Image: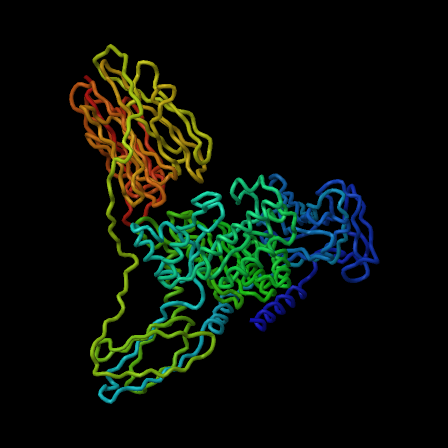
Amino acid sequence: MKLATLILCTSMCILVESLSELLKNPGFEQGTSNWQHDGFNMEAEFTHVHSGLSSVKCTGRSKSNQGPRQQVYVTPGGRYAFRAYIQLIDSVDIHLYEKVVVKIRFTWKDDGPVTYFVVCSRPNLSSVDGWVQIGADFAVPDREYTEAILYLRGLSPEVSFYFDDASLKEIPENLNWESEANTRIEQLRKSNLHLKFNIGSNLNRKDLIVQLDLSKHKFGFGSLVRAENMIHPDFTQYRNVVYHMFNWATLQDYKWKFNQGNRTHPDYSAAVKATDELLKNGLKVRGHCMFWATEGHVPGYVDSLSAAETRQEVENHMKYMTSISKGKLAHWDVNNELVHGNYLERKTKDPNFTKYLFKTVHAQDPVPKLCLNDYNVVARGDVTLAYLAQIQDFKRANVGLGAVGVQSHLTDFTEPDTTLMKNRLDILAQAGLPIWITELDVGTEDETARADWYEKVLRLYFSHPAVQGVIFWGFWDHHMDPIQSLVHGCTFELAEAGRRFLRLTKQEWSTHVNQSLESSPTMDVRGFRGVYDLTVWYKGKPVKHRTLTLGKTDKNLTIGIYGDGSEIQLPVKVDPFASVDTDPKTSSRRLRTLGQASSSSKADTLTCTSRQSGVSAVGIDNFVDVSCQDGEVLTGCSSWMVNNDWRREGEQIVMVNGRPTCRAADGYLALAGVQAQARCCSRRGLTCTYRTAGPSGSGIDDQVEVPCTGGTHPLGCSTWTWNSHSDGSYFTNSSCISQNDDPKVGVYSYAACCAGLSGQCSTVYSQLSGQAIGDVATVNCPSGQVMTGCNVYSKFARAAGAQITTLSGVTSCRAVNGFARYGGEVGVQAIATCCPRS
């Protein structure tokens, strides 16, 4: 590892050194010439330099954007390396950290607004640090410009500093990266295996065939998984897919804010049970994360605690978390994203508090490797050097840092740049610690391009000597952005990216050998490192099965094949993509009546109109209400997302000041608001009773039913859930049924059970919509009937909603699909109740 890292660093340094310098007077050996400054003092300094004879001293600053600057000439779309050294002069309070940023101000040729492009940033600076290197490897925007000014900014006003040894050089694209990566893979990820077989005298060697298959990589290939899905009986196929595709898993259910109990009685039982399930099936587990360094990631009560109280609360949390997970986890992310935040340091007024966390966690549970984990360190390079410095600082402190987490959230719709990414990996590898890619994702709607991009970064990461594993930040489009996913839908159909991943890990980067022993009782294999299944076949029947492990060193192994050739039973293999049936349950839990309403109309003809709310604010639990007017009765309540997305909680019938009201709520991660629609009807004698039940069970397709009794008929049905996951409403001629989709919480059903109509009402169903987002299903009432309620049902959840529309005198129930469907997944269905007009 050390030798390989040294070679990588040396080659990179030679490359950078050989390139032409683009800055003028980069080391300030000619004083301040070619550098500009406004509103502060910048003068040559000869006694305090980083190297050479001169640096510059910057004093008298009154604004954070004041710093040295120089006009630069860079090629649009080009790759560049910027480096410089800075030292703060002022005695900044050690608890108040400074942040310096280098930007390029672009004035565009097309007269677009000026852009301040971030080259790099270095947080957590103080005057006690001495000279600190800042810089980044970066690509400039591929856009023509008229002026580009590189400048330093970000430090607090009145902070003075020295600045020296600035450099800006172009980085040529490495066109040979793939062949070089393949060569490294051959060298780094394989070992030699020599097998000798001792064969019993009663077995004929020519009838013996040895089958050798890599079953589990030594290198980590994993994904973020959801704890509830790992333990709920209805998600057997989800688990089968996880076990087939990965040998590692990350559980983010260990986050402090994910506590399902309370402050005094915490509950992380789902995370622990999921960990046990994963371990039982041979996967290693990353715990993510015990603490989080940026704002907004602690329980709300922590913000108001004093320094001493915060420290005690953290002590309690550490002790509890290590007690429930002791010996189970392979990795712990101790304090996530520490480059980007220092929440606990500020709360405790202790600049070394995270080092204390590492030391304490390591003492309480020495089994897991303790990790730093941060972003914009390889996918982008803004803080790569800052992260390296932090890693080296923790390593010197000897507090138990065991590995380096690189999140790797790549920019969506942008092809990854392997030249820059490898440079950044090489920089981090200088710390001499194992690197883990912990949160990989990249997105595009083009399935082939997404697969190509994942393949590029996987090949780069798999080939790097410092990288020991790659964890995807999710694999299933139901738990991540679909444009980043490997697997689609409730049918678990592989996306092209998923097929590509399996082709790499189970074919190109895997070893499978079948060899007859007729000519020789030995086998020589150069294979990928990991766990192998070895099966001996005699006359076409298995007679021996065992596992073996191939590690970093070559292996010699002698295996005996004895017996009479009797067939043995091989381990049963599960098809991970075979559908697994569930057993949904129906209940009417907590069935109750909410209220009643009657129409004051004197007419014997049924008339109905739709009344819409405004659009809700964007975000979880933001709701809108709409009610009927005096004399009208609420017979139906539906909702829809204005952007055709699915992230809504659904709708409820609630009593507001005694008036039945249709309420719709926006959902978690919604990007647009929701609207509610009340169906309001009038007729002599029309009365409605509003009933609800729920929650349903938490199983897939578990239902909660609200029966309409006493001669009433369900004129409208609605579904609501806390977390946006439901299949919606299903109408029958005597009840409303709401269907669950998610294992965390169930759904609630609402019914408008009405009487006083002439004749029998009926339920009508549309054909299924298409599979694309925004595809529509519509259904109309038969002639002579009036639509009293409308909603949407989706067998595979994620509907955008439903509403009643009238166009050219034709009234329709219109349901909209809110999620892209694949394979056997079907679209949505519009369902409506129709009643005789008179």
Of residues 329 and 102, the one drawn nearer to the viewer in this rendering = 329
| Horizontal relation, residue 378 to residue 671: left or right | right
Using the rendered image of the protein, determine whether residue 790 is visible from the camera's viewpoint.
no
Please tell me whether residue 768 is drawn above or below residue 609 in the rendered image.
Answer: below
Of residues 326 and 411, the one drawn nearer to the viewer in this rendering = 326
| Horizontal relation, residue 62 to residue 809: left or right | right
| Horizontal relation, residue 764 to residue 620: left or right | left
Which colour style is shown?
rainbow
Please tell me whether residue 164 is drawn above or below residue 38 in the rendered image.
Answer: below
Query: Which residue lies most toward the left here?
Result: 759
Using the rendered image of the protein, determine whether residue 271 is visible from the camera's viewpoint.
yes
Q: Which quadrant of the rendered structure holds the C terminus?
A: top left
Q: Which quadrant of the rendered structure holds the N terminus?
A: bottom right
What residue sits 84% from the left and 58% below the top? 47
Query: Which residue lies most toward the top here?
Result: 602
Please tell me whether residue 574 is drawn above or below residue 788 in the rendered image.
Answer: below
Coordinates of residue 727 in the picture (x, y in percent): 30, 39
Please tell me whether residue 519 is drawn above or below residue 542 in the rendered image.
Answer: below
Query: Which residue lies most toward the right here?
Result: 46
Coordinates of residue 531 in the picture (x, y in percent): 38, 71
Q: Quadrant of residue 164?
A: bottom right
Of residues 640 and 769, the one drawn nearer to the viewer in this rendering = 640
Count of labels in the image: 0
Coordinates of residue 759 in the picture (x, y in percent): 15, 21
What residue sits 44% from the left and 64% below the top? 220
Of residues 489 and 777, the one drawn nearer to the viewer in this rendering = 489
Coordinates of residue 523 in the picture (x, y in percent): 36, 82
